Image: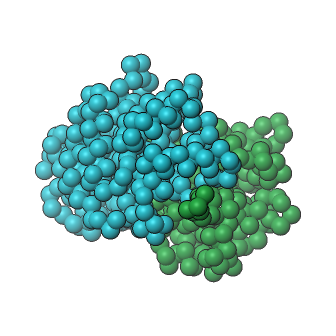
Amino acid sequence: MAQIVNHADVDRSLADLEHASELEDLQAVIIKLRDTYCIDHLVYHWVNSQGDQYGCGTYAPAWVDRYIEKDYLRIDPVVLGCYQRFHPVDWKRLDWSSKAARSFRREAIEFGVGNQGFSIPIRGPNGQYALFTASHNCSDTDWDEFTKTNRRPLILLAHFFNQKALEFEPDRLPEASRALSPRETDAMTFLAMGLNRAQAADTMAISEHTLRVYIESARFKLGAINTTHAVARAMSRGLIVV
Amino acid sequence: MIRYLYGDQLSKMPKLEEAMFLDRADQFKMRLGWDVEVDGAGRERDQYDAMNPLYVIYEKPDGTHGGSMRLLPSTGRTMVNEHFADILGGGEVRSPLIWECTRFCLSRGAEPRTAAALMLAGGEVMENFGVKHFVGVFDARMVRIYRRIGASPEILGAMGAGKEKISIGLWSFSEQARARVGAKAGISASLSRQWFARAFGAGHPPLAQSA
């Protein structure tokens, strides 16, 4: 469990994600990422208001079939607990007290879902809703350590998967802009030129604290989980000139 | 005590809900003269309240509203991006790790510790949900209050003048700031955690192995 995640591997997967053009591509990426994080499962699950669902992930196909056949969307505490929310949830914090929820969980464990889970709800445009979940079989202590270490990258990955899935929608509505702002462009440029954060902040006449916010936002818009990759991406896309 | 309630959960506590929106009208319309909409019943609500935000509310012992703030992730529509883009350097801030904090409100005659309690709760949200930064929109008099409770945001800029002056600032989580606001609020770390757990679940194992 105490594996150190190789960020270069995550970045390669994100590049693959960027080039994905159909659901099968997303499936290949999520399998690779699951392996990178050394956990049992990683799942992206889109649910719409009509109760239609689709996604990709590493759960056993038999479990996915069972879930759909039994209409477990109606009782799954993860789906119920994350709907209309935007904070990430450790499964331990959800309400598993009902009889239906307990037997659902027993069954999920039998199908190899794992006894631990961490789910990130995503609110897309116009009421779109999806979940990104990591699950595993381990002790509470190990899982706490895993989620503490990897929570933020997983939150970013959740949103990157959702953006991609939204792109696949035939009649999709316009999304929030992902263009870099002038300040974000400056921040990426100075970092690309080899300035450290203090120097970049100084050059831009802002504090390091403020610079961190611009970098964070740029990183998200560029689909990267760390700053080095964000800078590389901004350069390769010609968004910055060094 | 601190309540963490999404918009769709407010109706479970109607007295608190009513008092919050009335106090917001009192603060932003009556006292500060901001250009905000107040409905026939005297409640101040805007379009972002319709987006099911997460409210952090200081509930007084009599069950009414002492103060509150409203949180939304910057991946969706935000007041900061739609109204204050100039202050942020002319673009949008977007990341699931950056949330905005707006409508920071203190009821008339709120105990001095109220603002500190809200900031303590803000730290709880950051720490537990992996949020790195809050971008806040607040009235300029809050700058002094934040400083007094030891939770000064970094001010990015302001619009307007006098009572109507609106400031934009940034907060990041720090253990020292948390300890400071906790002390100012007179709330222990364990009590704060307990309030948070009551809203979002305690984190006990879902099932005994035997279940």
Q: What is the display colour for chain A?
A: cyan
View extreme (right): residue: B62
Q: What is the display colour for chain B?
A: green
Would residue A170 be visible to someone looking at this image?
yes
In this image, A52 relative to A230: left or right? right
At which x and y percent is residue B162? 62, 56
User: What residue lies at 55% left-to-right and 62% top-to-bottom?
Assistant: B209
Q: Quarter holding the C terminus of chain B? A: bottom right
| In front of the other: A45 or B87 | A45
User: What residue lies at 65% left-to-right and 38% top-to-bottom?
Assistant: B50
| In front of the other: A234 or B33 | A234
Q: Is residue A237 above or below residue A95?
A: above
View extreme (top): residue: A171
Q: Is residue B171 above or below residue A55?
A: below
Query: How is colour applied across the structure in the image?
Result: by chain
At which x and y percent is residue A5? 27, 60
User: What residue lies at 79% left-to-right and 51% top-to-bottom?
Assistant: B13
User: What residue lies at 57% left-to-right and 36% top-to-bottom?
Assistant: A72
